[in-house]
Amino acid sequence: MTALSVNVNKIAVLRNSRGGNEPDVVRAARTCLQSGAHGITVHPRPDQRHIRTDDVLALAALTLEHEVEFNLEGNPFAPPREGYPGFLALCEQVRPAQATLVPDSDGQLTSDHGFDFERDAERLRPLIAELKSLGCRVSLFVDAGGAGLALAREIGADRIEIYTGPFAQAQASGDARAALAACVDTAREAQTLGLGVNAGHDLSQANLPEFLEAVPQLLEVSIGHALISEALYVGLQRTVHNYLQILSSPQ
């Protein structure tokens, strides 16, 4: 079975928009785990626009308590700054089961491309070695159909995570054949090289079945935005009914 790691970044976005601690990121993550999710993913960014360092520490404790995987995503090249000690420093503090390296810049709204291994491989090599010395499995964010997987393996990566945004967009437009074929080819090449295969970005209930059917031996999917959005619709009716029940009760 492919593992589901729930990304709770969006819970933190909502919390930070108002201040305080509601909605509670740890409570939301605990609910996901109690519902059967196999792990929790977060992607703390240097500007702390959603997940913060204190969230990372709290979620690390939660996943340890539940004996499930903690997947920490981030750009290992981003320098530390106030409130953000840097990706490797965070990994040293919490020792996540998996460190997923992503080449996102500060200005990006969300991760939207994989590594250029011809350019980045030698910069990544010592960082991967350091992360593995901490006991982390290392996964690298890659574009479907991109080059350089042999380099990814040679510099020490354990897995890749296929960026599935283009597939999701194509599937929503009605023809995902080319985008899906690129994902399949990348997965097969990675597996031939001895790399495990994860996937993530814009996967949803609408497109995940097609992706799973096509992509062989997928180890893990990381899903956040769609899952949280879908949960709002599923849970709104019950929540409104609960409020109405309170309001209709004799005072």
Image (spheres, grey):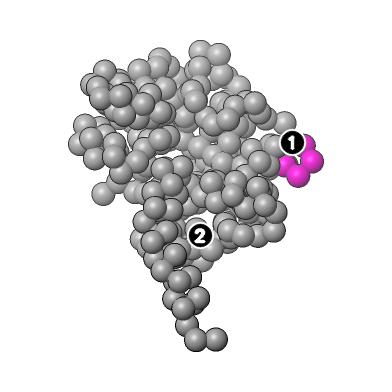
Q: Residue at image x 55%, y 51%?
A: 11
* Residue drawn at 29 percent across, 36 percent down: 207
- With 137 as the anchor, is 53 left or right in this view? right
Residue 34 colored in magenta in the image: no
Can residue 102 be seen in the rendering of this structure?
no
> Viewer-proximal residue, 84 or 31?
31
Task: Give the residue number, with chain letter if any, for mark 1.
Answer: 80
Q: Which residues are magenta?
A: 81-86
User: Could you tell me residue 53's position as x and y percent?
Assistant: 68, 49
Question: Nearest the camera: 211 or 176?
Answer: 176
The amino acid marked with disc number 1 is Pro
Q: Given contact means CB atoms under 8 Å apart, are the residues at marks 1 and 2 in contact?
A: no
What residue occupies the far left of the structure in this picture?
213
Where does the image place residue 40, in percent across and percent down from the top left?
47, 52
Q: Nearer the viewer, residue 115 or 202?
A: 202
Question: Secondary structure beneath disc 1?
Answer: loop
Quarter assignment of residue 76: top right
Label 1, residues with CA under 10 Å away: few <14, some 14-19, many ≥20 = some
Q: Position of residue 141 (x, y in %)?
A: 47, 29
Give me the residue at 72% from left, 42% from top: 84
